[in-house]
Amino acid sequence: MTSAVKFQANSDAGELPARLRPAATHAPKMVGQAAGPFEVPADADKGPSLRDALVTGLLVIYPTVATVVAIVAGLFLASANGT
């Protein structure tokens, strides 16, 4: 026994039903949205700066100097033992 009565989910008579967008369309992006922590801002493509060069130099030079100092300290301590 089925009923042929239409059920109306909206109780407000003047309210329009919700409309869904087609699956093939994309939601519009906000133009003024700020870049997140892992996104590159649009105007950051100016090339490398002095700060970038200094940080890169520090990242390359510091491990090299630390390795040489550790080797020299190890040799000095080995010779101070008397062997």
Image: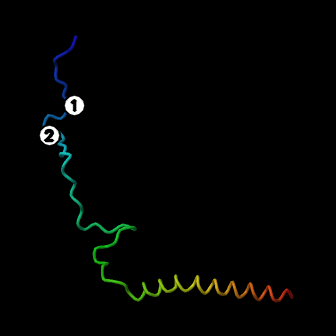
- 37 with respect to 67 (left or right): left
Q: Mark 2 points at which residue?
A: 16
Query: Residue 80, located in which quarter of the rendered image?
Result: bottom right
Residue 44, horizontal then vertical, whole percent: 32, 78
Relative to 9, say whether 53 is above or below.
below
Query: Colour scheme of this structure image?
Result: rainbow
- The x and y percentages for residue 59 are 52, 82
Front residue of 27 and 2 = 27
Which quadrant of the rendered structure holds the C terminus? bottom right
Relative to 40, residue 48 above or below: below
Residue sitting at x 67%, y 87%: 69
Q: Which residue corresponds to the image point at 14% horizontal and 34% vertical from the top-left?
A: 13
In the rendered image, residue 33, in percent from the top left (x then y), is placed at 28, 66
Q: What element carries label 2?
A: loop
Q: Which of marks 2 and 1 is nearer the N terminus?
A: 1
Q: Which residue is drawn at 31% across and 73% down?
A: 41
* Residue located farthest toward the front when viewing the structure as drawn: 83
Q: Which of 75 and 55 is in front in this view?
A: 75
Which of these two is toward me, 24 or 27?
24
Tell me if 67 is positioned left or right of 56 in this view.
Answer: right
Task: List x then y, in percent, for residue 16.
Answer: 14, 40
**Could you tell me which quadrant the N terminus lies in?**
top left
Count neighbours of disc 1 (C-alpha within 10 A) and say few if under 14, some if 14 to 19, many if 20 or more. Answer: few
The residue to which callout 1 is attached is 9
Q: Quadrant location of residue 3?
A: top left
Disc 1 marks a residue whose amino acid type is Ala
Q: Which residue lies furthest to the right in this view?
A: 82
Disc tally is 2
Q: How far apart are marks 2 and 1 (CA)?
A: 12 Å
